[in-house]
Image (tube, grey):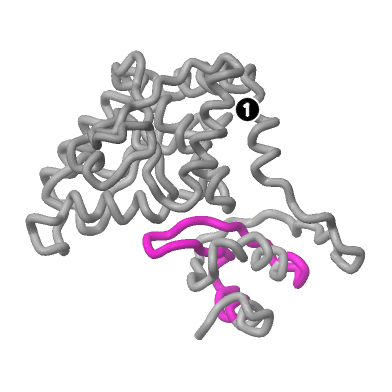
């Protein structure tokens, strides 16, 4: 899912979600590694600032000779950290590669599915599978679901957020996501009345996702941002998809 549309913010949030999940399945002091993707060093700084502010976080060491908590491909293969922090789309790709590399890619024969949804003030326990997930993965995913429910991932997450917020989490997130000074010709767009949104519109770059949603709001259509199997999506109500695609095409946010 989309932890945030800003990559660095998303990865910092993902670290807290991963730690919460690991603790819920019995890893009392999970080690954290940061995959060496764009922004990894900024994420490292943010997490170490949280640690300096009193948040109890243990960093993993890379198996490579130079060590450190920024992980490489070797560390993915050997499972150097308990929690590997990455951005949303990269993580999705790695999950698919590891689960189906012995089957040619069209059948997930290994793994435990895609794990639980975790978030601040989120109180539902939802885990997902892929359409390509085979019966071994389904069985493991059910076991995984049992473990996080038994370990009460919701309570663990709530406690984790209480601790991380005491370490100036909100301030650190705000510093990561400072926006440019608002231009005079920018206008505030009011959100229309909420409605059920199940129609997916893909093809919008993640950096433009929130702006694309506001284009639809400006036209009186309620929309939400999200993350689908192939990347960022805009969600609108059934029956409004065609009109919304035209609006986004006209505004330059998607392609035919």
x, y percent for residue 132 = 20, 58
* Residue 103 in magenta stretch: no
Report the residue marked by disc 1: 169
Towards the viewer: 70 or 93: 70
* Residue 244 in magenta stretch: yes
Q: Residue shown at 42%/25% (left/top)?
A: 20
x, y percent for residue 110 = 13, 45
Q: Residue shown at 83%/55% (left/top)?
A: 181
| Residue furthest right as drawn | 184
x, y percent for residue 249 = 61, 82
Q: Residue shown at 58%/51% (left/top)?
A: 6
Decide: is 122 above or below 101.
Answer: above
Q: Secondary structure at mark 1?
A: helix
In magenta, the rendered stretch is 217-245
Left or right position of 23 against 7? left
x, y percent for residue 222 = 68, 62
């Amino acid at each position: 899912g989309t932890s945030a549309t800003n990559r660095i913010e998303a990865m910092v949030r993902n670290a807290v979600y991963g730690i919460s999940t690991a603790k819920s399945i019995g890893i009392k002091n999970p080690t954290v590694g940061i995959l060496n993707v764009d922004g990894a060093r900024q994420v490292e700084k943010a997490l170490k600032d949280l640690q300096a502010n009193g948040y109890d976080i243990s960093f993993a060491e890379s198996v490579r000779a130079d060590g450190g908590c920024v992980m490489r491909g070797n560390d993915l293969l050997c499972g150097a950290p308990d929690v590997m922090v990455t951005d949303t789309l990269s993580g999705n790709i790695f999950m698919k590669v590891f689960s189906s590399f012995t089957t040619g890619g069209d059948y997930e024969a290994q793994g435990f599915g895609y794990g639980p949804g975790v978030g601040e003030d989120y109180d539902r326990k939802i885990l997902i599978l892929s359409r390509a997930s085979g019966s071994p993965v389904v069985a493991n995913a059910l076991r995984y679901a049992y473990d996080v429910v038994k370990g009460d991932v919701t309570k663990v997450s709530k406690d984790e957020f209480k601790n991380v917020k005491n370490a100036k989490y909100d301030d650190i997130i705000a510093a990561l996501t400072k926006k440019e000074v608002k231009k005079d010709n920018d206008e505030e767009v009011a959100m229309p009345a909420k409605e059920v949104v199940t129609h997916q519109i893909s093809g919008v770059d993640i950096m433009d996702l929130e702006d694309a949603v506001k284009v639809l709001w400006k036209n009186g259509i309620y929309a939400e941002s999200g993350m689908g199997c192939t990347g960022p999506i805009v969600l609108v109500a059934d029956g409004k998809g065609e009109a919304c695609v035209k609006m986004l095409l006209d505004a330059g946010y998607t392609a035919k």
